[in-house]
Amino acid sequence: MDVLVQLILNGIMLGSMYAIIAVGLTLIFGIVRVVNFAHGEFLMVGMYAVYLISKHMGVHPYVSALPAMVLLFAIGALVQRFIIQKLLNADEHIQIFATVGLSTALINGALMVFGADLFSVNAPEVRKTIALGPMNVLIGHIVIFSAALALVAGLHIFMQKTVLGSAIRATAQNRYAAQLMGVKVERIYIISFGLGAACVGLASALIMPLYPVSPTIGSYFVLTAFVVVVLGGMRSMYGAFFGALIIGVVDSLSGYYIAPDLKEVVYFAIFILILIFKPTGLFGFGRGTE
Amino acid sequence: MKVILGAALAAGVALSSQTALAQVKVGALYPFSGGLALLGDESFRGLELAVDERNAAGGLNGKKLEIVKGDAVDPNQAVGEARRLTSVEKVPVVFGSYSSSISLAATQVAELAGIPYFEMGAISDPITERGFKNVYRTNPTAKDFANKIVDAVTDAVAPALKTDAKALKIAIIHEDSLYGQTVTGFQVARMKEKGLNLVETLPYSAKSVDLTPVILRLKSAGVDVVLQTSYQNDTVLFFRQMKEQGLKLKAIIGAGGGYSLTDTMKAIGPENFEGALNVDFTQYKTNPAGAPGINEFVAKYNAKYGSAPRSGHSLANYMGAKVILDALAGAKDLSGASVRAAMMKIDIPSGKTATGWGVKLNDKGQNERGSPYIMQWQKGDLVTVFPKEAAVADMKTGGGAP
């Protein structure tokens, strides 16, 4: 029984890590309608940035969350402005190839600059555990869980209460109608892509104390994030948040009760079943619910 | 003008044929560029130092050795470069190759051409199990690694714990690519042979971001000893999460890979990696009494390259090349038959080379006296702890959460 509770708790913590990444991916997909295959590499870039900032300025990795988010926002906005925007009216495949190409370029760029070695930051207090009865929870995980909640709540308020948020929602619902209402759609796309990338900037500062960074670290997280996005209905950040928690728990339970090397099989099976039976996502948050 | 050109050409031809007379070429096939380049080059330096030594001692039959490099970044290029070395450069013998996939491809070309191929670093067993007549290997294989790891439990860990090895609950965890699967297959066979108690075998993806389920399984099973075959990221994750979940072990043994790298120790922290055992090629914190010539090698390396060796690969290649070149010096010529006769004559007992390995080839060309050593991370250093003659420190027990 203790093991089961510990596994579920761990799954939720793991899921909240996926949630922050998946919410960013959902923003980009839901608004700009581009599948960003370079999302994992944005995470990698963010983690190297956090590593460099903490190492050279001697600050805690959590403090570098802000500069990392600003940097990633800038990278996201530039990618949208100078790569995706040129391809907006091109075939969808072309956009996918563009982000895949960007991903390959970023991985190899990191290999050239940093080599294949691992880099980690020294933040032992984040790696301490708190005992909740018979269970152990990492302090770093509690921070990530709280940050994921705060991120979704913050984005909710931003989308519902601000003019810019309304413009973003309008663009997501109908690009042409929004344009007719005087929304500068291209600007909205740049901001949205930047916001999606900034989520990864937040994630990189929170993940860096727990996982060492290497050029391929992005692929460790992002494949799962894609499953989460589909599970959540592709365009809903609430769907992405709950989808991430579910995948986290499935990951944790199947790793223990089935086999550690078969957990991917379990959640990719879920992925395929959802695509076949409920393509609007598990919660029906799909089209038109932004 | 024509005359001058002709004279220059003639002079050139004369010059090159003159040097060719006094020299004998040897091929060196390693990955010199691409992702494997660092350790490929490190391996090559061992060969280069052995060739320098041979030349200083008079070369082969009075001829100086000249190395011709072949850059094999992957199996495809290995085939191309092996063909170039054997048919264009016309080298009589080839040395190599660090990586198993490169060696498997290049040895086929050499065998077809009837050119002797000396492998001094790749560990995949099939390299010497395909019935080739011209392939020789001085280093131990994956099976030797797996056997040594299991033997470490019976010969080193159990005596240190003052218990019977059969009473220990042992688990194998491994990343699920070819490397992990190969070593694990041999380990399971050896454990059956020795009648040990294997309670769990858990494969996992090296790209896992959470190994807590693995750790909880080990915890539920009450495991004493863990054998892990892993790369770098998964080793780091496992040790960190083992501490978080409070998993205590009596011993944990790695199979080279991530366990041999200083970066792994730095990411985990020396205090958390303390006591982790590792089985690998001979490293530099080894007692020279069990590996005569190891300190001289380090000194020569320093003098030639201006830094300490970057890994044990250069030492393994130096030792292999030295033994082979000494044998070739006694051969009539470098034809396949003469080389085979000379190689089969080698008979060096254990503890007499710079890696501590003995050399005696079986009829497949595989060295049967090469055996990896058992090492342990102690205070941030990877020190040899077993066997006794090569040890520089006593083995400690324990691993995982403090």
Image (spheres, rainbow, N blue to C red):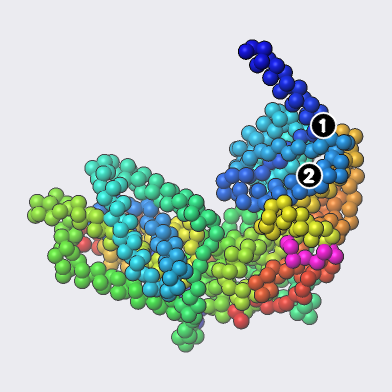
Nearer the observer, B98 or B344: B98
Q: Up-down: is A124 above or below B133? A: below
Kindly identify the residue that appears in the image at 71 percent across and 30 percent down. B89
Dot 1 amino acid type: Ala
Q: Residues within 10 Å of mark 2 (few under 14, many from 20)?
A: many
Q: Position of residue B116 (x, y in %)?
A: 78, 37
Q: Up-down: is B143 above or below B247? A: above
Is residue B132 inside the magenta stretch?
A: no
Q: Residues within 10 Å of mark 1 (few under 14, many from 20)?
A: few
**Residue span colored magenta:** B283-290
Between discs 2 and 1, the one toward the N terminus: 1
Q: Which residue is mark 2?
A: B51
Could you tell me which chain the residue with mark 2 belongs to?
Answer: B
Secondary structure of the residue carrying tag 1 is helix
Which quarter of the image is occupied by the C terminus of chain A?
A: bottom left
Kindly identify the residue that appears in the image at 25 percent across and 68 percent down. A155
Kindly identify the residue that appears in the image at 72 percent across and 51 percent down. B304
Kindly identify the residue that appears in the image at 81 percent across and 47 percent down. B53
Quote the CA–CA distance across marks 2 and 1.
15 Å
Q: Which residue is mark 1?
A: B22
